[in-house]
Image: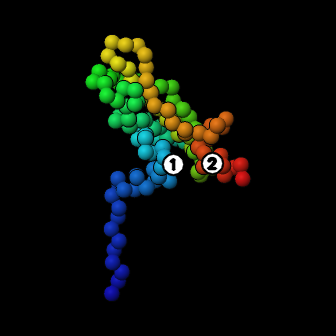
Amino acid sequence: MGQKRKSRPSTDTLFETVSRMLVPDYILEHFDIYGANEYPTCWVIELREKEDLIPLELKDSPEVIFDGYCNPIETLSHSFVCKPIYLKVYRRRYKLSGEDKHYSNSYDLTLKGVKMVPELGLFLKE
């Protein structure tokens, strides 16, 4: 006679759902979440570029070497529980074996002139 007990979603499913709530989909297409830290005044979600996104200039070269990360880009995502949430985005840096020139991908992660995701910036402009 009672209601059927609803099964609990897996931890991976919950993590994916919460990730999509906090980080825009267009960022999750290119970046994976590597961590989240709470500080007294804010939250910071760390994202790193996916490994298979090698810059087009180097795509066909067999001698591509991963060479660390570019300086991170910090952008305001939104506020949650009275604290702002910042996304700290690391792009991968590559070079050809034996060369010093570095290559990396470019992304439009913020509104021009404002360090916040476009959705938040457009919302605040209205």
Check disc 1: other Cα within 10 Å, few if <14, some if 14-19, many if 20+: some
Q: Nearer the viewer, residue 28 or 44?
A: 28
Label placed on residue 104: none
Picture quarter containing residue 8? Answer: bottom left
Give the distance between the C-alpha atoms of the residues marked 1 and 2, in whole angstroms.
10 Å
Helix or strand or loop: what does disc 2 sit on? Answer: helix
User: Relative to 90, does residue 13 appear above or below in the rendering?
Assistant: below
Q: Residue at x 48, y 46 (%)?
A: 26
The mark total stands at 2
The residue wearing badge 1 is: 24
Where residue 94 sits in the image (x, y, percent)? 39, 24
User: Label 1 sits on what residue type?
Assistant: Pro
Where's residue 89, x and y in %? 49, 35
Q: Nearer the viewer, residue 59 or 69?
A: 59
- Look at the picture and state if 119 lies above or below 73: below
Residue 96 in the image: above or below residue 86? above
Q: Is residue 2 left or right of residue 120?
A: left
Q: Which residue is mark 2?
A: 120
For residue 60, what is the image quadrant? top left
How is the model colour-coded?
A: rainbow
In the rendered image, the residue lying farthest to the right is 126
- The amino acid marked with disc number 2 is Leu
Q: Is residue 93 visible?
A: no
Q: Position of residue 54 (x, y in %)?
A: 37, 31
Out of 8 and 88, give the one closest to the viewer: 88
| Secondary structure state at the residue bearing disc 1 | loop
The first of marks 1 and 2 along the sequence is 1
**Mark 1 touching mark 2, by CB under 8 A?**
no
Q: Residue at x 62, y 48 (%)?
A: 120
**Residue shown at 33%/58% (left/top)?**
10
